[in-house]
Amino acid sequence: MSVSADSGGADLDSIEELDIRHLPEVQDSTEAERHHRKKQLAAAFRIFARYGFDEGIAGHITARDPEFPNRFWVNPYAVHFSRIRMSDLLLIDEQGRVVEGSRRTNKAAFWIHSSIHDARPDVVAVAHAHTLHGRAFASLNKPLAPIVQEACAFAGDHVLFDEYKGLVLEKTEGGRIAGRLGGCRAAILRHHGLLTVGRSVEEAAWWFIAMDRACQMQLLAEAAGNPRIMSDEEVAVAHRQFGNANMARHNFNLLADLVVEQEPDILE
């Protein structure tokens, strides 16, 4: 099940985009890009910890390596998000082996993330965590509704993975998730939680934060009454503006800059 956003006749080209500086998606060299991805990945874990997205050993974010696109960087097993440094990150190959790093990884992280990275060459990063509001919403077996402008970032751009078979410990299950995700930026995994992807670590992490908050807002609004569903034209405007990848990168960088300043050990 997926949600579509019909423009309702709105001229999308006439919808004004936000007047913000364009941030480059990639750095000038492979080494610079690898360093950037690892720095942003470590920052994403620290940010997730600040938002309370940690749940024991669960949760993982990956970043494709710019030189070896079939490999990705990921957090080590059983290290709290708030303690992850750049040097802690593991590089995983196509068979799930650690080719750089001294710890082990989470098997579920490999099957979910490797399947999505394989299926989506456009995806640089994948984020998945077991959050309070994300899991609560995932139990409702329905997609997000466009009831606030920020939720419209996912209008026509997220799916409901409506099956549950426990922990993802095999390739076929990861493949089903990747197949259901298709070309979308996010998925609600029934009874499990949320998953987001992006062409950068910044995008994937920010979409995750935004989606979890959208889940929280819908839970609050529906508990209080019957929230108004935005019109097709309103959704089209909000999706173009709040689903903007450049804005996602800006939003993430605001948080990442604080982390680097306040927790400089992240760069070790």
Image (cartoon, rainbow, N blue to C red):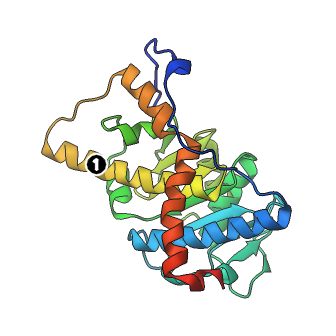
Give the residue furthest to the top: 9
Q: Is residue 184 above or below residue 99?
A: above
Above or below, 155 relative to 77: above
Which corner quadrant holds the C terminus?
bottom right
Residue drawn at (37%, 25%) of the image: 234
Q: Is residue 133 visible?
A: yes
Against 268, residue 91 (above or below) is above
Residue 259 location (% of width, % of height): 50, 74
Residue 32 location, quadrant:
bottom right
Label 1: which secondary element: helix
Asked whether 167 or 4 is in front, the reply is 4
> In the rendered image, is residue 139 in sight?
no
Q: Amino acid at mark 1?
A: Met
Q: Is residue 199 left or right of residue 253?
A: right
Q: Residue furthest left?
A: 224
> Relative to residue 23, is residue 95 drawn left or right?
right
Residue occupying image coordinates x 47% and y 27%: 4
Residue at which label 1 appears: 217
